[in-house]
Image: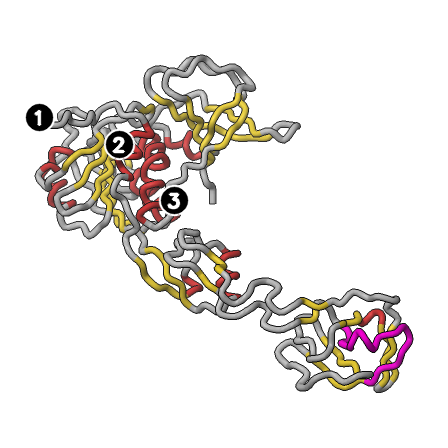
Amino acid sequence: MAPTPRPLKNLTVEDARARMLDGAIRLGVETVPLAASLGRVLAQPVIAARPQPPFDASAMDGWAIRRADYAPGRAFAAAGESAAGKAFGREIRPGETVRIFTGAPVPAGADLVVIQEEAVREGDVVRFEAGEDPKSNIRPAGGDFQAGDVLLDAGLVIDPWRLGLAASAGLAEVPVARRPRVAILATGDELVPPGGAPRPDQIFESGSFSLVALIQAWGGEAIRLIAQADDAAAIAATVAPARADLIVTIGGASVGDHDLVKPALRTLGLELAVETIALRPGKPTWFGRLTKGQSVLGLPGNPASAMVCAELFLRPLLAVLAGGAPEIGLVTARLAAPLPATGPREHWMRAALASDLEGRTIATPFPDQDSSLVGVFARADALLRRRAGAPAASANDVVEVLPLRRG
């Protein structure tokens, strides 16, 4: 008996996302210069080859001596100097002291650095008044990390602090996951590129510009294909040669006479895994794979719908392809004003965030949530999640929000 086909329509957000991620794996590994690794995902652990610091180092400017020799007011012979990168070349002898600077190697035999404020030099003689049991002021060898320590785990995104740690271990290059290549195709007879001359019945195409910026911010390489009118043959001819791991289409995702993207891509072997999602905005969002193995994410043509679905589906998909984890990053906030009950579809509302006098995060949904409004999205700080079938909410109720990264 043949298995029952999986439903493709009106999937939950979680089910749709799971289907998109099913089979998604890190694309490959490449080695890049450390200076070019910011924002990339480590493909292998970073392991320390030597300790840091590699020697006992002075934590202060002062004088290095043997603690066993120290006594308040005792005279020591100034024997030389130890500076960063210019160590004192021999073991310190009893009764000697060496001028030392912050970060410099502590001479062999010395185990105490008396800070310069507690020292008095008279020619080649130095006396100390540092109390009976002064602090050592020495950073021990390996105090930061030891040879063989795992400094950074595979899967971490390299940020400025992690980059500095890798540099302190002496790495000039790091192995990272290859960036996913994403081709973007906007469709529709109504679209004109910015700078063009639209007819009265046309609008400027904006969705692909936002998506390019998001894809780059999320670790991918964006390729903007030439926008196509509602012509199935032209759409297929544009997508077929695209050298990309993932194809994202904008528009033509519904079931109208001019929604031709899916029929066009069926000529390239499109097999759907998601046809519609119980989501507002973004119900027509779909996902599938072509015969050549490329994944295709179909986003609605309305800009707000496309951007909401990019946050919910494209971002985690890119994270996995780039070697990371598909985290969504929901946090809680207090609702600023009442909201009505949610219908059968999950609703993701554009909202502004602020803090009250008690330091709590307050979320204020914008009153107009029309999916065509680009201006509202540009002012939003977050997406506020209302689950399907949720009852009416009151002011001060706890809600889930997805903060939007701004810069």
Label 2 with label 1: CB-CB less than 8 Å = no
Disc 1 marks a residue whose amino acid type is Met
Q: Which badge, 2 or 1, comes first in the chain's sequence?
A: 1
Q: Which residue is mark 3?
A: 325
Visible in this render: residue 306? yes
Q: Which badge, 3 or 2, comes first in the chain's sequence?
A: 2
Q: Quadrant of residue 208?
A: top left
Disc 2 marks a residue whose amino acid type is Gly
Q: Residue at x 43, y 35 (%)?
A: 378
- Magenta-colored stretch includes residue 226: no
Residue closest to the eye, 30 or 374: 30
Q: Quadrant of residue 67?
A: bottom right
Q: Which residue is mark 2?
A: 301
Q: Residue at x 65, y 68 (%)?
A: 140
> Does residue 9 sit above or below 187 in this rendering?
above
Q: CA distance from mark 3 to mark 2?
A: 28 Å
> Does residue 335 sit above or below 60 in this rendering?
above
Return the x and y of residue 251 as percentages of the image width and height: 23, 33
Of the numbered discs in the image, which one, if any, rests on residue 1? Answer: 1
Label 3 with label 2: CB-CB less than 8 Å = no
**Secondary element at tag 1:** loop
Residue closest to the eye, 375 or 262: 262
> Does residue 386 sit above or below 132 in this rendering?
above
Please provide the residue range marked out in magenta.
62-77
Return the x and y of residue 360 as percentages of the image width and height: 60, 29
The quarter of the rendered structure image containing the N terminus is top left
Q: Residues within 10 Å of mark 1 (few under 14, many from 20)?
A: few
Return the x and y of residue 23 as percentages of the image width and height: 25, 42
